[in-house]
Image (cartoon, helix red, strand yellow):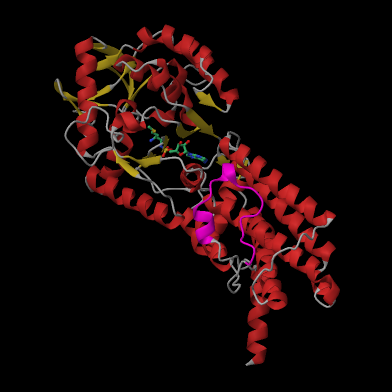
Amino acid sequence: MYYITTAIDYTNAPPHIGHAYEKVLSDVLARWHRLKGEEVFFLTGVDQHGQKVQQTAEKRGITPEQHAQEMTQKFLQLWDRLGISYDGWAETSDPRHIACVQKILLNLFNKGALYKKSYKGFYSVRQEQFLTDKERNEQGEFGPEWGEVVELEEENWYFKLSEQIPWLKDYANRSDSFVLPGFRKAEILNAIDRASEGDLCISRPKSRLSWGIEFPFDPDFVTYVWFDALINYISFAGYLNETDASLPEFNKLWPASCEVIGKDILVPAHGIYWPAMLHAMGFSDTQMPTLLVHGWWNINGEKMSKSLGNVVDPNALLDAFGKDAVRYYLVRDITTGKDSNFDVDRLVMLYNTELANDFGNLCNRSINMTRRYQKSRLTPLNGYDDDLSSQLRQSMESTVQTFSAHMDANMVGEALAILNGQVSACNGYIESQQPWQLAKDPTQEDRLNCVLRHLLECCTQIAYLISCVLPEASVRMLGQLNASEICSKLVPDHLSWGILPKCHQINDPEPVFPRILSKEEKAKLQNKAAKKK
Ligand code: MSP
């Protein structure tokens, strides 16, 4: 079972392009593993509790539930528009999740892994949090951004994180599957060293935060963020569930093959707290999940943030350019694990060149020529072959191999670049073979037939492979190639040359990737139309 999860998104604000990237990347990986014939369960959802949601709701004069639900709808609508094929939906206010978190808290309490203690420190009234020396400025003071700072004593619940550190250090050093890409491991090891002293505060008094999950053995407290949010990966996979038939069977899913998260929540949350929590619950080394850590989309080299006013709204992009362009760009123009700069001109350029001009045109021309020169039906090859065709076959075969290897390694952008390379090879093949000349010469019939077969076969294989990134475009393309049924029986591991039958009949062409026009191009077209009138 390929069990893939994403970070659950905070519902204090609407989704932005960073959230969309993580979901599209995970969706592409989920679809890739389904294509490979694996059983897949893809979980995503929203992180609804916490101070920020409570504060935003208070400002809006509504309840935290109302605010969280309103934002949750925005995430759901966006995932629908982007075609995110999740199997499970995680909302932290779901009673099934709450029950699981409470069972875990009780188990850990009974095991002696939790304790209550009093803490005295400096507290920012505005930010509603305790401050440490890290928050002091160069003058050694807490700056004006913290508002009124008072000394406060508060009791809270703590998780014995320090007890787990020796095991975690050993596990992180030994394991090759803990975190991907591999270069992130050093970050975890460094952070473990820093975390070796001190335990994790996991509660807030209800008087301060009411929008959270109540401690089953101390109702004056609610669980504070990570002890609630991280548990979604197991609660919605059916952990400790005995009665609810709507949840999956935990043993079938766990451990997660891939927990897709952004680099900002690797340490300490996912790289330290999460494995430590699981280990304290009794999970063994082989039951630890694999973390896939992606980089960030920045704007002109800067972090996207509300205060900078540079947040990119995925809905506006979808309105302007459509699902294919947005999905393609988000996984094409970034290397998994690294950061990239969001640039709408590159989105348009990549769509127009690689999809509209290169791939779209290739399919359109190939189908059109087959219709014109062979009445839409291929004829058997009769042993004919030539060097150019043999080279094209070889490059298609190696494209399948390399594409698959990159996808297996979660390197979607690189996999798409490989596919685009094959599209260019096909377009070059058309220029060299000049089918329109061959069609004029009856002695070249075998060669023409061979060229068209090679083109249609490549188009089919590429349309099949690209389905995990552009599922709807792939369906339309395979429909025109009349190859949907053929492809439904394939798995990429066994994909080899010759999937189209000897006398394959195709359907009529229809453009799949209409060009995105610039403002000038649109104006020109409008002018022309006006003149005609
Ligand atoms: N709620 C927590 C995660 C809990 S997981 C148990 C959270 N939420 S978030 O809404 O702030 O972020 C959700 C995901 O979006 C995170 O993985 C985060 O890294 C990712 N991204 C947020 N901004 C991003 C970019 N600008 N670019 C790419 N991904 C980014 O953290």
5 displayed left or right of 447: left
Q: Position of residue 76 (x, y in %)?
A: 36, 51
Q: Quadrant of residue 444?
A: bottom right
Instruction: Give the quadrant of the N terminus.
Output: top left
Q: Is residue 454 above or below residue 415?
A: below
103 displayed left or right of 52: left
289 in the magenta segment: no
The boundaries of the magenta stretch are 484-503
Residue 321 visible somewhere in the drawing: no
Instruction: Pick whichever, 343 or 323, lies toward us.
Output: 323
Instruction: Give the quadrant of the C terminus.
Output: bottom right
Q: Position of residue 209 (x, y in %)?
A: 24, 31
Ligand 1 is located in which of the four quadrants?
Answer: top left
**In the image as oriented, which residue stretches furthest toward the front?**
382
Q: Residue at x 42, y 19 (%)?
A: 286
Residue 76 visible somewhere in the drawing: yes
Q: Position of residue 439 (x, y in %)?
A: 80, 75
Instruction: Pick whichever, 437 or 133, lies toward us.
Output: 437
Our reading of the magenta stretch's main secondary structure is: loop
Q: Is residue 356 above or below residue 286?
A: below
